[in-house]
Image (spheres, rainbow, N blue to C red):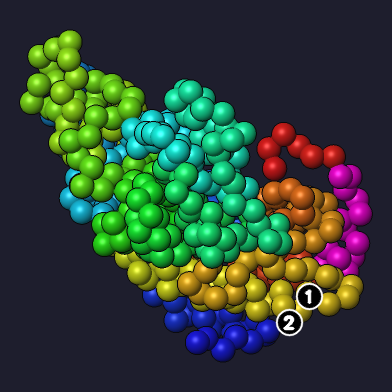
Protein backbone atom coordinates (compact mmCIF):
# COMPACT_ATOMS: atom_id res chain seq x y z
CA UNK A 1 0.00 0.00 0.00
CA UNK A 2 1.34 3.41 -0.98
CA UNK A 3 2.03 5.82 1.88
CA UNK A 4 1.04 9.26 0.63
CA UNK A 5 2.22 12.67 1.78
CA UNK A 6 0.76 16.15 1.37
CA UNK A 7 3.89 17.99 0.22
CA UNK A 8 4.57 18.83 -3.42
CA UNK A 9 7.88 16.98 -3.39
CA UNK A 10 6.04 13.70 -2.87
CA UNK A 11 4.12 14.18 -6.14
CA UNK A 12 7.34 14.93 -8.00
CA UNK A 13 8.98 11.85 -6.49
CA UNK A 14 6.07 9.68 -7.63
CA UNK A 15 6.35 11.07 -11.16
CA UNK A 16 10.08 10.37 -11.23
CA UNK A 17 9.36 6.70 -10.42
CA UNK A 18 6.33 6.35 -12.72
CA UNK A 19 6.98 3.74 -15.47
CA UNK A 20 4.19 5.26 -17.57
CA UNK A 21 5.41 8.86 -17.32
CA UNK A 22 6.79 8.91 -20.89
CA UNK A 23 3.39 8.31 -22.46
CA UNK A 24 2.26 11.82 -21.59
CA UNK A 25 4.50 13.13 -24.38
CA UNK A 26 2.57 11.04 -26.91
CA UNK A 27 -0.63 13.02 -26.28
CA UNK A 28 -1.52 16.52 -27.41
CA UNK A 29 -2.12 18.71 -24.35
CA UNK A 30 -4.78 21.42 -24.27
CA UNK A 31 -2.31 24.21 -23.76
CA UNK A 32 -1.52 24.50 -20.07
CA UNK A 33 -4.82 22.99 -18.92
CA UNK A 34 -4.92 20.08 -16.48
CA UNK A 35 -7.25 17.72 -18.31
CA UNK A 36 -9.26 15.70 -15.78
CA UNK A 37 -12.13 14.80 -18.11
CA UNK A 38 -10.72 11.76 -19.91
CA UNK A 39 -13.61 9.69 -18.54
CA UNK A 40 -15.83 11.69 -20.92
CA UNK A 41 -13.48 12.25 -23.86
CA UNK A 42 -9.87 11.15 -23.94
CA UNK A 43 -7.17 13.39 -25.35
CA UNK A 44 -5.81 12.91 -28.85
CA UNK A 45 -2.59 10.93 -29.09
CA UNK A 46 0.05 11.05 -31.78
CA UNK A 47 -0.47 7.31 -32.16
CA UNK A 48 -4.16 7.77 -32.95
CA UNK A 49 -3.33 10.63 -35.32
CA UNK A 50 -0.85 8.42 -37.19
CA UNK A 51 -3.32 5.62 -37.91
CA UNK A 52 -6.02 8.11 -38.87
CA UNK A 53 -3.71 9.79 -41.37
CA UNK A 54 -2.65 6.40 -42.72
CA UNK A 55 -6.31 5.62 -43.41
CA UNK A 56 -6.79 8.99 -45.09
CA UNK A 57 -3.76 8.31 -47.29
CA UNK A 58 -5.13 4.88 -48.20
CA UNK A 59 -8.46 6.40 -49.17
CA UNK A 60 -6.65 9.04 -51.23
CA UNK A 61 -4.40 6.59 -53.06
CA UNK A 62 -6.40 3.37 -53.17
CA UNK A 63 -10.02 4.45 -53.37
CA UNK A 64 -12.29 1.43 -53.26
CA UNK A 65 -9.28 -0.88 -53.47
CA UNK A 66 -8.69 -0.10 -49.79
CA UNK A 67 -11.36 -2.64 -48.86
CA UNK A 68 -8.98 -5.38 -49.89
CA UNK A 69 -5.66 -3.57 -50.17
CA UNK A 70 -5.28 -1.41 -47.08
CA UNK A 71 -2.44 -2.15 -44.69
CA UNK A 72 -5.19 -3.83 -42.75
CA UNK A 73 -7.86 -4.53 -45.39
CA UNK A 74 -10.85 -2.40 -44.56
CA UNK A 75 -13.23 -5.33 -45.00
CA UNK A 76 -11.72 -7.03 -41.93
CA UNK A 77 -10.69 -3.89 -40.00
CA UNK A 78 -13.42 -4.22 -37.36
CA UNK A 79 -12.42 -7.80 -36.59
CA UNK A 80 -8.68 -7.08 -36.56
CA UNK A 81 -9.15 -4.22 -34.10
CA UNK A 82 -11.45 -6.41 -32.02
CA UNK A 83 -8.64 -8.93 -31.69
CA UNK A 84 -6.23 -6.13 -30.76
CA UNK A 85 -8.63 -5.03 -28.04
CA UNK A 86 -9.49 -8.52 -26.76
CA UNK A 87 -6.61 -8.78 -24.23
CA UNK A 88 -7.70 -5.51 -22.59
CA UNK A 89 -11.03 -7.08 -21.63
CA UNK A 90 -10.02 -10.71 -21.23
CA UNK A 91 -11.68 -11.96 -24.40
CA UNK A 92 -10.63 -14.80 -26.67
CA UNK A 93 -9.92 -14.45 -30.39
CA UNK A 94 -12.94 -13.27 -32.41
CA UNK A 95 -15.08 -12.57 -29.33
CA UNK A 96 -14.66 -8.79 -29.80
CA UNK A 97 -15.41 -6.57 -32.77
CA UNK A 98 -15.08 -2.78 -33.12
CA UNK A 99 -18.38 -1.65 -34.57
CA UNK A 100 -21.38 0.62 -34.19
CA UNK A 101 -22.18 3.07 -31.45
CA UNK A 102 -22.73 2.24 -27.80
CA UNK A 103 -26.52 2.42 -27.70
CA UNK A 104 -26.90 0.78 -31.12
CA UNK A 105 -24.72 -2.06 -29.84
CA UNK A 106 -26.87 -2.31 -26.71
CA UNK A 107 -29.94 -2.66 -28.94
CA UNK A 108 -28.46 -5.34 -31.19
CA UNK A 109 -27.25 -7.38 -28.21
CA UNK A 110 -30.35 -7.02 -26.03
CA UNK A 111 -32.66 -7.70 -28.98
CA UNK A 112 -30.76 -10.97 -29.40
CA UNK A 113 -30.57 -12.12 -25.81
CA UNK A 114 -33.81 -10.72 -24.38
CA UNK A 115 -36.31 -13.48 -25.09
CA UNK A 116 -39.21 -13.16 -22.62
CA UNK A 117 -41.20 -16.33 -22.11
CA UNK A 118 -43.86 -17.17 -19.56
CA UNK A 119 -43.21 -15.57 -16.18
CA UNK A 120 -39.51 -15.02 -17.04
CA UNK A 121 -39.95 -11.78 -18.94
CA UNK A 122 -38.25 -9.04 -16.98
CA UNK A 123 -34.97 -7.17 -17.42
CA UNK A 124 -32.89 -6.28 -14.37
CA UNK A 125 -31.02 -2.96 -14.31
CA UNK A 126 -30.50 -0.25 -11.68
CA UNK A 127 -31.46 3.34 -11.01
CA UNK A 128 -27.90 4.71 -11.18
CA UNK A 129 -27.10 3.39 -14.66
CA UNK A 130 -26.48 5.86 -17.48
CA UNK A 131 -29.96 6.95 -18.63
CA UNK A 132 -29.37 6.05 -22.30
CA UNK A 133 -29.14 2.38 -21.32
CA UNK A 134 -32.47 2.57 -19.51
CA UNK A 135 -34.12 4.29 -22.48
CA UNK A 136 -32.92 1.49 -24.74
CA UNK A 137 -33.98 -1.28 -22.35
CA UNK A 138 -37.45 0.24 -22.10
CA UNK A 139 -37.66 0.36 -25.90
CA UNK A 140 -36.61 -3.29 -26.21
CA UNK A 141 -39.29 -4.32 -23.71
CA UNK A 142 -41.92 -2.44 -25.69
CA UNK A 143 -40.74 -4.04 -28.92
CA UNK A 144 -41.29 -7.47 -27.35
CA UNK A 145 -44.82 -6.52 -26.29
CA UNK A 146 -44.04 -5.74 -22.65
CA UNK A 147 -44.54 -2.77 -20.35
CA UNK A 148 -41.36 -1.13 -19.00
CA UNK A 149 -43.24 -0.03 -15.87
CA UNK A 150 -43.75 -3.71 -15.07
CA UNK A 151 -40.90 -5.46 -16.84
CA UNK A 152 -37.89 -3.22 -16.18
CA UNK A 153 -36.75 -3.92 -12.64
CA UNK A 154 -34.44 -1.25 -11.21
CA UNK A 155 -32.27 -2.01 -8.21
CA UNK A 156 -32.37 0.96 -5.85
CA UNK A 157 -29.35 2.63 -4.28
CA UNK A 158 -29.21 2.75 -0.50
CA UNK A 159 -27.46 6.12 -0.45
CA UNK A 160 -27.96 7.61 -3.91
CA UNK A 161 -24.29 7.02 -4.82
CA UNK A 162 -23.55 3.30 -5.04
CA UNK A 163 -25.36 0.03 -5.75
CA UNK A 164 -24.68 -2.94 -3.48
CA UNK A 165 -24.04 -6.27 -5.22
CA UNK A 166 -26.13 -7.97 -2.52
CA UNK A 167 -29.12 -5.89 -3.62
CA UNK A 168 -28.57 -6.81 -7.27
CA UNK A 169 -28.43 -10.50 -6.42
CA UNK A 170 -31.50 -10.25 -4.20
CA UNK A 171 -33.40 -8.82 -7.18
CA UNK A 172 -32.53 -11.84 -9.37
CA UNK A 173 -35.91 -13.51 -9.06
CA UNK A 174 -37.33 -16.22 -11.30
CA UNK A 175 -39.07 -13.47 -13.28
CA UNK A 176 -35.75 -12.01 -14.53
CA UNK A 177 -34.67 -13.18 -17.98
CA UNK A 178 -31.78 -10.76 -18.62
CA UNK A 179 -29.61 -8.44 -16.52
CA UNK A 180 -27.81 -5.41 -17.94
CA UNK A 181 -25.51 -3.51 -15.61
CA UNK A 182 -22.60 -1.06 -15.86
CA UNK A 183 -19.08 -2.12 -14.99
CA UNK A 184 -18.39 1.30 -13.45
CA UNK A 185 -21.03 3.80 -12.39
CA UNK A 186 -20.69 7.04 -14.27
CA UNK A 187 -21.20 9.34 -11.29
CA UNK A 188 -19.50 7.69 -8.33
CA UNK A 189 -16.84 5.62 -10.13
CA UNK A 190 -17.95 2.47 -8.27
CA UNK A 191 -16.67 -0.74 -9.90
CA UNK A 192 -19.07 -3.70 -9.78
CA UNK A 193 -17.88 -7.20 -9.00
CA UNK A 194 -18.71 -8.53 -12.45
CA UNK A 195 -17.38 -11.99 -11.75
CA UNK A 196 -19.73 -12.42 -8.80
CA UNK A 197 -22.69 -10.89 -10.67
CA UNK A 198 -22.11 -13.24 -13.62
CA UNK A 199 -21.86 -16.31 -11.41
CA UNK A 200 -25.00 -15.45 -9.47
CA UNK A 201 -26.97 -14.63 -12.61
CA UNK A 202 -26.02 -17.90 -14.28
CA UNK A 203 -26.95 -19.90 -11.17
CA UNK A 204 -30.46 -18.55 -11.71
CA UNK A 205 -30.57 -19.05 -15.47
CA UNK A 206 -30.26 -15.32 -16.21
CA UNK A 207 -28.38 -13.93 -19.22
CA UNK A 208 -26.04 -11.14 -18.11
CA UNK A 209 -24.34 -8.33 -20.02
CA UNK A 210 -22.32 -5.26 -19.06
CA UNK A 211 -21.90 -1.70 -20.30
CA UNK A 212 -18.16 -1.20 -19.89
CA UNK A 213 -17.91 2.33 -21.27
CA UNK A 214 -16.43 3.67 -18.01
CA UNK A 215 -13.94 0.86 -17.48
CA UNK A 216 -12.49 -0.35 -20.78
CA UNK A 217 -8.98 1.01 -21.12
CA UNK A 218 -8.43 1.63 -17.41
CA UNK A 219 -9.68 -1.54 -15.69
CA UNK A 220 -8.75 -5.03 -16.94
CA UNK A 221 -11.62 -7.51 -17.29
CA UNK A 222 -11.81 -11.29 -17.73
CA UNK A 223 -15.01 -11.75 -19.71
CA UNK A 224 -14.19 -15.16 -21.13
CA UNK A 225 -12.94 -16.53 -17.82
CA UNK A 226 -16.02 -15.21 -16.02
CA UNK A 227 -18.36 -16.55 -18.71
CA UNK A 228 -20.09 -13.19 -19.21
CA UNK A 229 -22.64 -13.48 -22.01
CA UNK A 230 -22.04 -10.13 -23.69
CA UNK A 231 -20.65 -6.64 -23.18
CA UNK A 232 -20.34 -3.38 -25.07
CA UNK A 233 -18.52 -0.09 -24.62
CA UNK A 234 -17.52 3.17 -26.24
CA UNK A 235 -13.94 3.88 -27.31
CA UNK A 236 -13.78 7.65 -26.77
CA UNK A 237 -13.18 7.74 -23.01
CA UNK A 238 -10.17 5.86 -21.62
CA UNK A 239 -9.59 4.31 -25.06
CA UNK A 240 -8.86 7.78 -26.53
CA UNK A 241 -10.42 6.98 -29.90
CA UNK A 242 -11.81 10.46 -30.57
CA UNK A 243 -15.24 12.13 -30.26
CA UNK A 244 -18.02 9.77 -31.26
CA UNK A 245 -15.55 7.06 -32.22
CA UNK A 246 -16.78 3.58 -33.09
CA UNK A 247 -17.83 1.36 -30.19
CA UNK A 248 -17.08 -2.28 -29.44
CA UNK A 249 -18.97 -5.42 -28.55
CA UNK A 250 -18.04 -8.69 -26.90
CA UNK A 251 -20.03 -11.91 -27.40
CA UNK A 252 -18.96 -15.04 -25.57
CA UNK A 253 -18.14 -17.82 -28.03
CA UNK A 254 -20.80 -20.07 -26.48
CA UNK A 255 -23.35 -17.85 -28.22
CA UNK A 256 -21.78 -17.89 -31.68
CA UNK A 257 -24.27 -19.20 -34.21
CA UNK A 258 -27.20 -17.50 -32.48
CA UNK A 259 -29.18 -15.33 -34.88
CA UNK A 260 -28.61 -11.62 -34.10
CA UNK A 261 -31.74 -9.71 -33.22
CA UNK A 262 -30.81 -6.87 -35.58
CA UNK A 263 -29.21 -8.30 -38.71
CA UNK A 264 -27.22 -6.28 -41.22
CA UNK A 265 -24.98 -7.13 -44.13
CA UNK A 266 -21.70 -6.49 -42.30
CA UNK A 267 -22.65 -9.27 -39.92
CA UNK A 268 -22.78 -11.69 -42.81
CA UNK A 269 -20.13 -14.38 -43.18
CA UNK A 270 -17.39 -12.94 -45.38
CA UNK A 271 -17.38 -16.05 -47.58
CA UNK A 272 -20.92 -15.35 -48.79
CA UNK A 273 -21.14 -11.59 -48.20
CA UNK A 274 -20.86 -10.56 -51.83
CA UNK A 275 -23.13 -13.27 -53.17
CA UNK A 276 -25.93 -10.86 -52.28
CA UNK A 277 -28.25 -13.59 -51.06
CA UNK A 278 -31.70 -12.67 -49.84
CA UNK A 279 -31.21 -14.81 -46.72
CA UNK A 280 -28.81 -13.69 -43.98
CA UNK A 281 -25.81 -15.95 -43.39
CA UNK A 282 -24.37 -14.73 -40.05
CA UNK A 283 -20.68 -14.95 -39.28
CA UNK A 284 -19.75 -17.66 -36.78
CA UNK A 285 -18.00 -15.16 -34.49
CA UNK A 286 -18.85 -11.92 -32.68
CA UNK A 287 -18.66 -10.34 -36.12
CA UNK A 288 -22.24 -11.52 -36.67
CA UNK A 289 -23.44 -8.68 -34.42
CA UNK A 290 -22.16 -5.98 -36.78
CA UNK A 291 -24.92 -4.20 -38.66
CA UNK A 292 -23.57 -1.61 -41.09
CA UNK A 293 -20.34 -0.92 -42.94
CA UNK A 294 -17.35 -0.04 -40.75
CA UNK A 295 -17.13 3.72 -40.29
CA UNK A 296 -13.46 3.84 -41.16
CA UNK A 297 -12.63 7.45 -40.30
CA UNK A 298 -14.21 7.03 -36.86
CA UNK A 299 -12.45 3.72 -36.31
CA UNK A 300 -8.90 4.34 -37.53
CA UNK A 301 -7.76 6.41 -34.49
CA UNK A 302 -8.70 3.50 -32.23
CA UNK A 303 -6.02 1.37 -33.87
CA UNK A 304 -3.20 3.70 -32.81
CA UNK A 305 -4.60 3.98 -29.32
CA UNK A 306 -4.97 0.21 -29.00
CA UNK A 307 -1.38 -0.42 -30.04
CA UNK A 308 -0.13 2.12 -27.51
CA UNK A 309 -2.24 0.63 -24.72
CA UNK A 310 -1.08 -2.87 -25.57
CA UNK A 311 2.49 -1.56 -25.35
CA UNK A 312 1.88 0.07 -21.95
CA UNK A 313 -0.18 -2.95 -20.74
CA UNK A 314 -3.58 -2.75 -19.09
CA UNK A 315 -2.07 -4.15 -15.89
CA UNK A 316 0.39 -1.24 -15.61
CA UNK A 317 -2.37 1.23 -16.44
CA UNK A 318 -4.59 -0.21 -13.71
CA UNK A 319 -1.74 -0.18 -11.18
CA UNK A 320 -1.11 3.53 -11.72
CA UNK A 321 -4.83 4.30 -11.85
CA UNK A 322 -5.35 2.84 -8.39
CA UNK A 323 -2.33 4.72 -7.00
CA UNK A 324 -3.23 8.07 -8.52
CA UNK A 325 -6.94 7.96 -7.66
CA UNK A 326 -5.96 6.87 -4.16
CA UNK A 327 -3.62 9.86 -3.99
CA UNK A 328 -6.36 12.25 -5.10
CA UNK A 329 -8.73 10.90 -2.45
CA UNK A 330 -6.00 11.17 0.18
CA UNK A 331 -5.41 14.85 -0.65
CA UNK A 332 -9.12 15.61 -0.45
CA UNK A 333 -9.55 13.69 2.80
CA UNK A 334 -6.56 15.28 4.50
CA UNK A 335 -6.83 18.85 3.17
CA UNK A 336 -10.39 19.49 2.10
CA UNK A 337 -12.93 17.39 3.97
CA UNK A 338 -13.44 19.71 6.96
CA UNK A 339 -14.67 23.30 7.33
CA UNK A 340 -14.58 25.54 5.39
CA UNK A 341 -14.07 23.20 2.42
CA UNK A 342 -16.52 20.35 3.04
CA UNK A 343 -15.66 18.24 0.02
CA UNK A 344 -16.80 14.63 0.13
CA UNK A 345 -15.94 11.56 -1.92
CA UNK A 346 -18.64 9.40 -3.49
CA UNK A 347 -16.20 6.80 -4.83
CA UNK A 348 -15.60 3.57 -2.87
CA UNK A 349 -12.19 3.48 -1.19
CA UNK A 350 -11.39 -0.21 -1.70
CA UNK A 351 -9.26 -0.85 -4.80
CA UNK A 352 -11.51 -3.67 -6.00
CA UNK A 353 -14.56 -1.38 -5.92
CA UNK A 354 -13.08 1.64 -7.72
CA UNK A 355 -12.87 2.45 -11.40
CA UNK A 356 -10.75 5.17 -13.01
CA UNK A 357 -12.32 8.42 -11.81
CA UNK A 358 -13.16 10.03 -8.48
CA UNK A 359 -16.58 11.48 -7.80
CA UNK A 360 -16.24 14.53 -5.53
CA UNK A 361 -19.42 15.96 -4.06
CA UNK A 362 -20.12 19.40 -2.69
CA UNK A 363 -23.33 21.36 -2.23
CA UNK A 364 -21.85 24.02 -4.56
CA UNK A 365 -20.63 21.40 -7.04
CA UNK A 366 -21.75 23.16 -10.22
CA UNK A 367 -20.32 26.55 -9.29
CA UNK A 368 -17.05 25.00 -8.08
CA UNK A 369 -16.85 23.09 -11.35
CA UNK A 370 -17.11 26.38 -13.24
CA UNK A 371 -14.49 27.98 -11.00
CA UNK A 372 -12.09 25.11 -11.73
CA UNK A 373 -12.59 25.62 -15.47
CA UNK A 374 -11.77 29.30 -15.00
CA UNK A 375 -8.52 28.12 -13.36
CA UNK A 376 -7.65 26.02 -16.42
CA UNK A 377 -8.64 22.71 -14.87
CA UNK A 378 -10.98 20.60 -17.02
CA UNK A 379 -13.33 18.45 -14.89
CA UNK A 380 -16.97 17.67 -15.53
CA UNK A 381 -20.17 17.77 -13.51
CA UNK A 382 -23.05 15.35 -12.99
CA UNK A 383 -26.17 16.38 -11.10
CA UNK A 384 -27.05 16.92 -8.42
CA UNK A 385 -23.63 17.75 -6.94
CA UNK A 386 -20.84 15.51 -8.33
CA UNK A 387 -17.59 16.89 -9.78
CA UNK A 388 -15.88 14.06 -11.68
CA UNK A 389 -12.09 14.04 -11.76
CA UNK A 390 -10.32 11.46 -13.92
CA UNK A 391 -6.53 11.20 -13.54
CA UNK A 392 -6.03 9.14 -16.71
CA UNK A 393 -2.81 7.15 -16.18
CA UNK A 394 -1.26 7.70 -19.61
CA UNK A 395 -1.33 11.49 -19.55
CA UNK A 396 -2.04 12.75 -16.02
CA UNK A 397 0.83 13.05 -13.56
CA UNK A 398 0.86 12.92 -9.77
CA UNK A 399 1.95 16.55 -9.83
CA UNK A 400 -1.13 17.37 -11.91
CA UNK A 401 -3.26 15.80 -9.19
CA UNK A 402 -1.45 17.70 -6.46
CA UNK A 403 -2.14 20.95 -8.33
CA UNK A 404 -5.82 20.08 -8.77
CA UNK A 405 -6.12 19.70 -4.98
CA UNK A 406 -4.61 23.17 -4.55
CA UNK A 407 -7.16 24.55 -7.02
CA UNK A 408 -10.02 22.91 -5.13
CA UNK A 409 -8.74 24.59 -1.99
CA UNK A 410 -8.26 28.01 -3.61
CA UNK A 411 -11.75 28.28 -5.10
CA UNK A 412 -13.12 28.02 -1.55
CA UNK A 413 -10.43 30.14 0.15
CA UNK A 414 -10.95 32.95 -2.34
CA UNK A 415 -14.72 32.39 -2.69
CA UNK A 416 -14.20 32.20 -6.45
CA UNK A 417 -17.19 29.90 -6.94
CA UNK A 418 -19.47 32.73 -5.83
CA UNK A 419 -18.77 34.54 -9.11
CA UNK A 420 -20.78 31.90 -10.97
CA UNK A 421 -24.52 31.35 -11.15
CA UNK A 422 -26.21 27.99 -10.84
CA UNK A 423 -27.44 28.13 -14.45
CA UNK A 424 -26.38 24.94 -16.24
CA UNK A 425 -24.94 24.84 -19.75
CA UNK A 426 -26.17 22.33 -22.33
CA UNK A 427 -23.04 20.17 -21.99
CA UNK A 428 -21.84 19.68 -18.41
- Note whether 70 is above or below 277 in the view shown: below
Q: Which residue is mark 1?
A: 337
- For label 1, count other residues whose C-alpha is less than 10 Å away and answer few (under 14), some (14-19) or many (20+): some
Secondary structure at badge 1 equals loop
Q: Residue at x 17, y 15 (%)?
A: 279
Choose between 270 and 27: the one closer to the eye.
270
The residue lying at 35 percent from left, 58 percent from top is 203
Q: Is residue 420 above or below residue 110?
A: below
Is 417 one of the magenta-colored residues?
Answer: yes
414 or 104, nearer to the observer = 104
Q: Image point 57% across, 61% down: which residue?
A: 167
Give the left or right position of residue 63, taking residue 191 as reference: left
Instruction: Please name the residue shown 78% across and 75% down the image.
Output: 337
For residue 334, the mark is 2
- Gap between marks 2 and 1 measured at Cα: 7 Å
Cβ atoms at labels 2 and 1 below 8 Å apart: yes
**Is residue 28 highlighted in magenta?**
no
Amino acid sequence: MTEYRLDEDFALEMDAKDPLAGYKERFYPLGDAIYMDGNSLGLMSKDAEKTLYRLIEEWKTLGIKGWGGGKIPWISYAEELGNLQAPLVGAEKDECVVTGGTTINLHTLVSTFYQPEGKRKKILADELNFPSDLYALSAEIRLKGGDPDEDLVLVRSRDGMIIEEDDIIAAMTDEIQLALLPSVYYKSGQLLDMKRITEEAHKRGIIVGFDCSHSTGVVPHKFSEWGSDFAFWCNYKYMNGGPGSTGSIYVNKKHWGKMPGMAGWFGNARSTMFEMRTDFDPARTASAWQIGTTTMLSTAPIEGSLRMMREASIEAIRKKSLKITGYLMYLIDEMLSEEPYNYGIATPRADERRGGHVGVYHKEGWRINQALIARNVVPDFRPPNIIRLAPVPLYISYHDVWKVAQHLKAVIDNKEFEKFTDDRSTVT
